[in-house]
Image: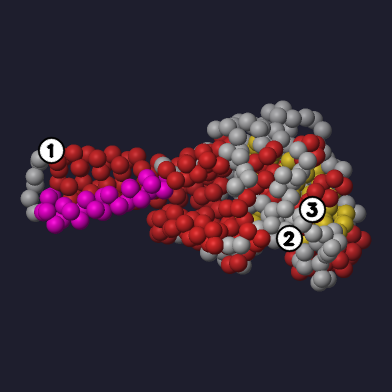
Amino acid sequence: MTITFDYFSIAISVFLLLLALISPWFSSMARRPRIKMADDIQNASENDVDESTCNSDSTETTEVHTPTGATSALPFVSIVLAVHDNACELEERLPQLLEQQYRGKWEVIIVDESSTDDTQDVLTRAKAKYPRLYTTFIPESSHYISRRKLSLTMAVKASKGDWILITDIDCKPTGNRWLATMAEHATDDKDLVMGYTSYDADTPAYWRYDRLNTLCYQLHRIKNGIAYRNVGCNLMFRKSDFIQQKGFIHNLVHLRGEYDFIVNEMATPDRTAFVYDFQAQLCQRCPADKTWLYDHLYYLESRTLMKRGLRHRLLCNTDQWMLHLGWLLPMAALAYAISASNLVVTVAATIALLLTLVTRLTIFLSTCRQFDEHISWWKAPWLEVRTVWQNAWLMWRHRRADRFDFIRK
């Protein structure tokens, strides 16, 4: 192998090094707002806030400052969720939902979608213990519209709260201040409040990475204009806006996508808050393989009706192109240089690969720390590369699926 300082070798080497410096920053995690979670901020401070109060001024939103426009009166919040054959989950989750510490007015409304197990018995016992719990049901005979969206619409219309906080029964709060922390951001200058929903530790690494990656894209959209969709099951919105937008009237036949449709239709520029606080976080039970698959297929169907999707997909596709170019071109150059005994290009390609690896790992680990996700560092390159092929497979599955798999017949 010889050292050859010809123009071609120098040009290739410079290009590879520039690519290694630039390509890692074409990723959702590199664009995410770099804000510490509120618990980290409080631990680093002298902790001069009275922890006995339910409101804290130390949390931050995507504007990177303390929320403004707050009123002295705490908002009346209605926690809403729909259930179907979830007796076991209700036994475990109801105390966590109904024993939240919040000084304002609040209620919990649960809609039973004609369960056939012991769901009604569990709810009856809980109502006797918790006076703020209200329940209703939808009949089995409802057709042609999504039962989940019908349930949520009924609950919202029956609620007394000014703000609606929706979640799913397979999610649990990380503590008893979830409601209070979310409500702190329900200020006059916000219409939507979003919190993070992580998967539990038993969930496959790629599923956790996929959610974190999707979240970072949405945080970028919130920070730089207007929210596109929701991530997880932790969303708060104004009842009046939901009624004014006529709820799910434009997508009522679609079985799922309720969180995404609410955000996509109700979001306006600079009026969405994301709560960077572990106390506002939910933990979702590891879904079954079929559930995870259908959640993604439902999104592919729902996005055909969602606004602002072209810009989102363009950004995702650009990131994937840069990701693969950042790995494949240096590998191809390295193979060529070794076969041609070109030491200059060999060294440059090797440095480019190492620089790409180190930069991407640094960004990945920093993002995991920010959202308290524990994913092994050595899996990061494979998880990133898997995304484009996983999405291609999902789109293939979606195109082969029957349209009636996604709508209420």
> Mark 2: few, some, or many residues within 10 Å (few <14, many ≥20)?
few
Residue 265 vertical position relative to residue 136 in the rendered view, above or below = above
- The disc placed on residue 326 is none
Quadrant into which the N terminus falls: bottom left
**Is residue 146 or residue 86 the one in the foreground?**
146
Q: Is residue 334 magenta?
A: yes
Q: CA distance from mark 2 to mark 1?
A: 66 Å
- Name the residue carrying label 3: 150
Q: Amino acid at mark 2?
A: Lys
Residue 75 seen: no
Q: CA distance from mark 2 to mark 3?
A: 14 Å
In the image, the segment drawn in magenta is 319-343
**Is residue 229 or residue 408 the one in the foreground?**
408
Q: CA distance from mark 3 to mark 1?
A: 67 Å
Quadrant into which the C terminus falls: bottom right
* Residue 58 placement: quadrant: top right
Residue 277 vertical position relative to residue 206 in the rendered view, above or below = above
Q: Residue at x 84, y 50 (%)?
A: 154
Q: Position of residue 143 (x, y in %)?
A: 79, 59
Per the image, label 1 sits on a secondary structure element best described as: helix
- The disc placed on residue 7 is 1
* Residue 12 placement: quadrant: top left
Q: Residue at x 87, y 68 (%)?
A: 121
Q: Amino acid at mark 1?
A: Tyr
Q: Position of residue 371 (x, y in %)?
A: 56, 49
Lateral position of residue 85 relative to residue 174, left or right: right
Q: Position of residue 131 (x, y in %)?
A: 91, 54
**Is residue 286 or residue 390 the one in the foreground?**
390
Q: Is residue 93 magenta?
A: no
* Residue 238 placement: quadrant: top right
Residue 24 seen: yes
